[in-house]
Image (cartoon, rainbow, N blue to C red):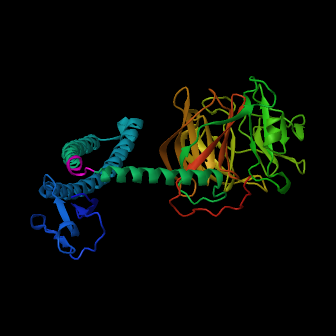
């Protein structure tokens, strides 16, 4: 019998309906869900060409439900065992804190002993030996615990490998239409689309002035504008960027200062990016005699240049609106500790959503970085934070939302943001966010809160970077101003 057909899927049971050449109403159609009792009869009229038949095609093999149950039970057991092991790890962490305290106590006792070896009795020495043996025993105990955990995770990996192989085999055998694979690909594409939309939003519509994030998570590829306005590769010292707190009529203004030596003698201002590229400044200001600066870690904020002064050694500012010049000496600041890549970088100015900052090292701290918050009106220091990062190991720093980020070189092409210090919580930690350099060395790196970009003066070239933030926490700080996006 010739006829037209249609395939139907009833909970995994495929039915193919054949009908005659002429349309007739089906008076009865019944399909039972039990695989071994399938019966479907459809009839219209008295028979012959006036009838419809329904054929059922059973799969060649039944689904191995037992195998899936075994995998599910194994997954539940693994989940329970992992929870127990995580509890052990928390216990290890607590023990390590106790061991650290004991070791610090022993260190202090040994230091006292070294300073005055004749001032301690034999009983004191015996007590010290007992304490050292106790710490050694605790360390051995911790080693055994770590070995046990290592063996557990190795066994766990093998079990999960078997589970994955079982699930892959089930999918390969029974998912003939590649439904699961298609669904995974769809989810992957959907996640990529969401990530693309998020990054587009952050680049073209950033939440300017907000600290509603937990820090930087990524830095873009270097965006190179061009060689400096002096058209010379020898002008490797200097900086460029935008005013981080622009006055009303200069919101699109850019600035540049460059030299072939360590000094800052002049600075150029451009009305917008186009004029920066065309090397067409509206103002070229030369520093008055005795007002010139040293080093390249200066910034422009509120139409004011903040920079390092050599004589006397300290901070200086010059306001281009009032033409007022001021200096400040920072007690304890050292002229010994500079950055790793360039000399004479003793003070480094930075600005962010919270205001103006300066970092430096002291002889008292043995070269460790100190962060100071500057009162812009009085040009005095409001508050100081001491960190544990050694300044000569750093290439540069910048501030974002009251958090200091330190940068170092990791190879011939890449830099790494490797350290952060939160001035709000006084918490410091090691991180690792790598980004690419355009040229070998750079003398100036600063964050600008008005567009959330990093500006780098890289061997005489203007370079900038987009930043991505982890927007998972509520704002920790209310910014003092809401700059206009340029």
Q: Is residue 225 visible?
A: yes
Q: Is residue 345 visible?
A: no
**Which quadrant of the structure image shows residue 78?**
bottom left
Residue 427 rendering spot, x and y as whole percentages: 50, 53
Q: Residue furthest bottom?
A: 27
Q: Nearer the viewer, residue 175 or 217?
A: 175
Image quarter in which the N terminus is found = bottom left
At 83% from the left and 34% from the top, the residue drawn is: 279
Q: Is residue 323 magenta?
A: no
Q: Main secondary structure of the magenta part?
A: helix
Q: Residue furthest left?
A: 36
At 58% from the left and 33% from the top, the residue drawn is: 392
Q: Is residue 267 left or right of residue 440?
A: right
Please, is residue 153 above or below residue 238 in the view? below
Residue 134 rendering spot, x and y as whole percentages: 23, 45
At 89% from the left and 41% from the top, the residue drawn is: 282
Please, is residue 320 above or below residue 27 in the view? above
Magenta region: 170-176
User: How many discs mark residues in the rendered view?
Assistant: 0
**Which quadrant of the structure image shows residue 441?**
top right
Q: Nearer the viewer, residue 400 or 145?
A: 400
Please, is residue 443 above or below residue 250 in the view? above
């Amino acid at each position: 019998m010739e006829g037209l057909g249609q395939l139907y899927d009833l909970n995994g049971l495929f039915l193919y309906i054949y009908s005659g050449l002429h349309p007739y109403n089906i008076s009865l159609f019944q399909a039972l869900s039990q695989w071994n009792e399938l019966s479907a009869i459809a009839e219209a009229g008295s028979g012959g060409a006036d009838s419809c038949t329904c054929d059922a095609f059973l799969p060649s093999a039944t689904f191995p439900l037992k195998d899936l149950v075994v995998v599910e039970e194994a997954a539940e057991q693994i989940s329970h065992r992992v929870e127990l092991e995580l509890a052990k790890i928390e216990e290890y962490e607590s023990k390590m804190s106790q061991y650290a305290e004991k070791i610090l106590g022993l260190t202090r006792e040994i230091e006292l002993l070294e300073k005055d070896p004749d001032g301690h009795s034999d009983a004191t020495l015996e007590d010290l030996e007992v304490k050292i043996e106790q710490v050694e025993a605790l360390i051995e105990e911790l080693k055994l615990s770590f070995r046990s955990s290592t063996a557990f995770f190795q066994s766990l990996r093998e079990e999960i490998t078997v589970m994955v192989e079982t699930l892959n085999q089930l999918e390969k055998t029974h998912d003939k239409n590649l439904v699961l694979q298609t669904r995974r690909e769809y989810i992957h594409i959907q996640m990529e689309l969401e990530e693309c939309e998020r990054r587009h939003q952050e680049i073209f519509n950033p939440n300017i002035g907000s600290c509603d994030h937990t820090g930087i998570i990524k830095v873009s590829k270097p965006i190179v504008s061009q060689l400096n306005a002096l058209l010379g590769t020898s002008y490797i010292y200097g900086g460029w960027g935008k005013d981080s707190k622009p006055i009303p009529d200069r919101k699109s203004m850019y600035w540049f200062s460059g030299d072939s030596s360590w000094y800052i003698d002049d600075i150029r201002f451009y009305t917008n990016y186009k004029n920066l590229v065309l090397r067409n400044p509206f103002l070229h200001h030369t520093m008055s005699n005795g007002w010139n600066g040293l080093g390249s870690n200066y910034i422009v904020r509120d139409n004011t240049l903040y920079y390092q002064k050599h004589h006397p050694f300290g901070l200086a500012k010059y306001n281009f609106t009032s033409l007022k010049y001021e200096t400040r000496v920072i007690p304890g600041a050292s002229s010994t500790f500079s950055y790793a890549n360039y000399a004479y970088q003793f003070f480094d100015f930075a600005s962010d959503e919270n205001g103006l900052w300066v970092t430096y090292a002291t002889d008292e701290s043995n070269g460790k970085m100190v962060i100071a918050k500057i009162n812009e009106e009085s040009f005095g220091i409001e508050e100081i934070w001491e960190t544990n990062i050694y300044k000569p190991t750093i290439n540069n720093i910048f501030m974002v939302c009251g958090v200091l980020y330190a940068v170092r070189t990791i190879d011939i092409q890449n830099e790494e943001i490797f350290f952060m210090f939160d001035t709000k919580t006084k918490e410091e930690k090691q991180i690792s966010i790598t980004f690419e350099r355009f040229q070998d060395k750079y003398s100036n790196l600063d964050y600008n809160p008005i567009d959330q970009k990093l500006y780098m003066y890289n061997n005489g070239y203007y370079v900038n970077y987009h930043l991505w933030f982890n927007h998972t926490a509520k704002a920790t700080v209310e910014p003092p101003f809401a700059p206009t996006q340029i």
